[in-house]
Image (tube, coloured by chain):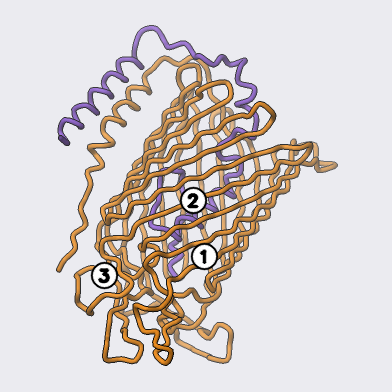
Amino acid sequence: MQLRARHSQPGRLLAPAILAAACALYSPASRTDVLPEDRADALASHYSGGGQDINGLSFLVRKKAGDHVSLSYSHLEDIVSGASIDVRTSGASPYREKRSQDGLNAEILYGKTTYTLGVTHSYEPDYRSNTANFGISQSMFGDLTTISMSYRRTWNNVFKMVCLVDDKDLNYPCVEKVRDPAFGEKDMDERSYGVGLSQILTRNSVLSANLEVITDQGWLSNPYRSMMYAEPGTGAGFALGPEVDPNTRTSNALGLAYKYYLPWRAALEAQYRYFTDTWHIRAHTAELGYTQPWRHWTFDGSFRFYTQTHADFYSDLFSSANEFNFMSRNRELSSFTSYTIGAGASYDFQIPHAPWITKSSANFRVDHFLIDYKDFRDALLIDPAKGVVAGSEPLYNVQLNVLQLFLSIYY
Amino acid sequence: MRSARSVLGWLIALLLCVQLCACSPIQPWVKPYERERLADPIMSFDPNPISSAYMDHVFEVRAASRGGEGAAGGGCGCN
């Protein structure tokens, strides 16, 4: 049986919105807008959980060039080490891998219109990605309203790494990796179309709405993940096969964000996002945040709730190797609920003997995740000796921690 | 049903267009001198872009949903 992804028609939804936004661009102008502040940020991050550690460093520098242009450059490097449950289930060894990303952006302000142009290059040994983006935003109604449109195009190349030299005595046994010539190079293209609205509602509150349609075409499977099917003849009761995803996907996301200035100097933020795609995944995201300044400090806390349904072609355990044309056991496509609680503190200070720096801040933030999978089981707990065979093992859940330490200077 | 919704969408867009392009501009109901609180940095939706870009990437590679809330970094985070 072949499962067919039903394609929505984003044009039906987007066209009226784009017409409205396009007309809005011709409304009378009365006051100039402003470019973002000149600033530089350096961030160190640490992610741990689910058998993986990821240490990252990133930088972002933004500087105006004249009265109309603001340029920004960003660079990040991540080092991923360990082995997730998928790697361990497949029997592969823990690994260590580096990812780097560079981005260059320009914001050009002309009257009340801001144009954004940018390019990004991301590189991993098994994943190469190039992105170009263009956006336009227009302030109107005495700067109460800002309407924006954006387009982004991404070209991705996917490879599969295989181990040439394996030393089982090491923590990361794969000493030398090369790209698998049998897998070759797979292409995946992505296009994103967005419209947005930012609206000042009252002297204390502001609302933002964003609609984004993303279409993908090409290799959308994961080269390392396997689907699992029942094999009653074996002790564990299962065998692994290649994951096969459809070659196209279109998704729609509508995000709303509301911020309110409380009667004392503090802010409350509420966000909601509805997501749907042609793989029949539905997701809801809700987040609440609170920001409280105190002397030189700013404290903030947040709680995020996320839930999604599984893709049409997802199953934890298929009944046979050829049950469907598309089959996946990718846990990101399963049904799950996640809760994230976060807290941050920021301290403002002046750097002596550097009058060109107008403000500086040191920031620390910690986020704790709890992810409860509804139909993804922990295959590592399969133990036929204890009567635990595939399909009867407990559901998987994971807790993750993300730490961020960053320094910001404004000049 | 779908075509009726489509026509309704175009009509609303057209009405909005006419409103936006009207001769007399709509007067802002929150005057510039009343926006002191909105200009406070604590009212920014994205006060720390470097941190939010990183967190967007963390969320995006661990779930199927994407978009609608700003751009995330590249990379697949596959393993």
- Chain letter of the orange region: A
Tell me which amino acid carries mark 3.
Met
Quadrant in the picture for residue A255: top left
Labelled disc at residue A327: 3
**Shade of chain B as shown in the rendered figure:** purple
- Across and down, in percent, residue A42 comes to 66, 52
Tell me which amino acid carries mark 1.
Arg
Horizontal side, residue A321 vs residue A286: left or right: left
Name the residue at 62% across, 15% down.
B33
Q: Nearer the viewer, mark 1 or mark 2?
A: 2
Horizontal side, residue A30 vs residue A357: left or right: left
Marked residue nearer the N-terminal end (1 or 3): 1
A273 vs A142, nearest the viewer: A273
Q: Are marks 3 and 2 in contact (CB under 8 Å)?
A: no
- Across and down, in percent, residue A128 comes to 42, 63
Q: State the residue position of label 1.
A: A99
Kindly identify which chain the residue marked by label 2 belongs to. Answer: A
Labelled disc at residue A305: 2
